[in-house]
Amino acid sequence: MLDKTIPIWPPLYEQMVVMDKIKQIKTLDSIAESMQTPRPKTYTIQEAQQLPLLHRKQGLVLKRNNSSCNEHVILPPLKSDLASNISQPDTTKELGVYGTWFAQDYVASLRTTGELRVFMVDGKTAEVMLGTTFSDNSQGLTIEVLKSPPLLSKLHK
């Protein structure tokens, strides 16, 4: 691969770790459980297909693992047969890894409120970014670095 010939930053293995949404979700689920805070539930496509029809069509978002672009996010409303929403199968290959589609409970307030992304270095807040998700005319994510971030201690009960 190219990274064996010339230096690439960040290294390819770090990029692959970042793109593994399933591992990130498991880590976030573990943190949320230890802090007793809610998290959207994640399902395989097969598990999600067993959910009630209304929840399948209006209450889920589809995402693809090993992807770093919004092309692999499908927002509600969805077709009731979840697999028919996916135009690119699991076998889409990027960077030598296969993507797997999964479903997650849709958090509608993210569309209007956004999400805070907190970057910590040595136990201290280094930077806080506000991600506002999916404007009406685009499925893009807008990231804004907050110059005066909210007190993070106030966000957690």
Image (spheres, helix red, strand yellow):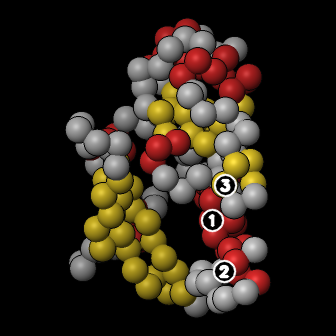
For mark 1, does the 10 Å Cα neighbourhood hold few (<14), some (14 to 19), or many (20 or more) residues? some
Q: Amino acid at mark 3?
A: Glu
Q: What residue sits right under mark 3 in the picture?
A: 94
Q: Is residue 86 above or below residue 115?
A: above
Q: Amino acid at mark 2?
A: Pro
For mark 2, does the 10 Å Cα neighbourhood hold few (<14), some (14 to 19), or many (20 or more) residues? few
- Percent position of residue 124, x then y: 50, 86
Secondary-structure class at tag 1: helix
Q: Nearer the viewer, mark 2 or mark 3?
A: 3
Front-most of residues 83 and 51: 83
Return the mark for residue 11: 2
At a point 30% along the width and 58% down the height, the residue shown is 142
- Quadrant hosting residue 134: top left
At a point 70% along the width and 78% down the height, the residue shown is 2
- Percent position of residue 152, x then y: 40, 71
The answer to whether the residues at label 1 and label 3 have Cβ atoms under 8 Å apart is no
Return the mark for residue 18: 1
Q: Nearer the viewer, mark 1 or mark 3?
A: 3
Q: Amino acid at mark 1?
A: Val
* Earlier residue among tags 2 and 1: 2
